[in-house]
Image: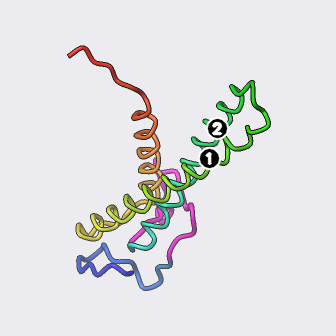
Amino acid sequence: MSSTSSQPGTTPSAQYTSPQFPSLYWPINAQAGEAVYLYYYGDIWRFTLFWTLIVYGAVYLSASAYALAMQTQNWKSAWVIPLVFGVVGGLEAMLAGSVIGLILGAIYDAGFFKMSTWIPFVWALINVLTIILSSFSIQGAL
């Protein structure tokens, strides 16, 4: 799944290899050659999926730990709580990470852009914050 961009400066050099996950770097005052970029659909999708799985996993396991701590009556079936949270969070993360990763890959390829490895991480945070925000009921006075 390679990009077919024809713009100069946006195609990877001949010695380009796909970066290893996570390949994050400090973007403020980065030294020359320190920044790592993604060029291909497969890499963009993979980084977005992995970051989404990690962030969703952390949030859903934290929520299951809180739910488990609030469970005071039926400890015999409490083991189901982290299992259900983990399965639901994993499925949501796979769906959201795949969709966003493919959309990002298409946009960056169509615009002949190179993608920083921070972009998939930021989109994973956006995904999970959207899930958290949608969990609240909003009662307006309109």
Left or right: where 57 falls relative to 41:
right
Three-letter code, disc 2:
Ser
User: Pointers 2 and 1 in contact (CB under 8 A)?
Assistant: yes
Magenta run includes residue 88:
no
| Real-space Cα separation, disc 2 to disc 1, in angstroms | 9 Å
Residue 97 image-quadrant placement: bottom left
Quadrant showing the N terminus: bottom left
Magenta run includes residue 28:
yes
- Rendered image: mark on residue 111: none
Name the outermost residue toward the right: 76
How was the colour assigned to the protein in this rendering? rainbow
Principal SS element in the magenta part? loop
Q: Residue at x 42, y 68 (%)?
A: 38
Q: Label 2 belongs to which residue?
A: 64
Which stretch appears magenta? Answer: 18-39
Q: Secondary structure at mark 1?
A: helix
Q: Is residue 135 above or below residue 104?
A: above
Three-letter code, disc 1:
Val
- Rendered image: mark on residue 84: 1
Residue 105: percent from the left, percent from the top?
34, 67
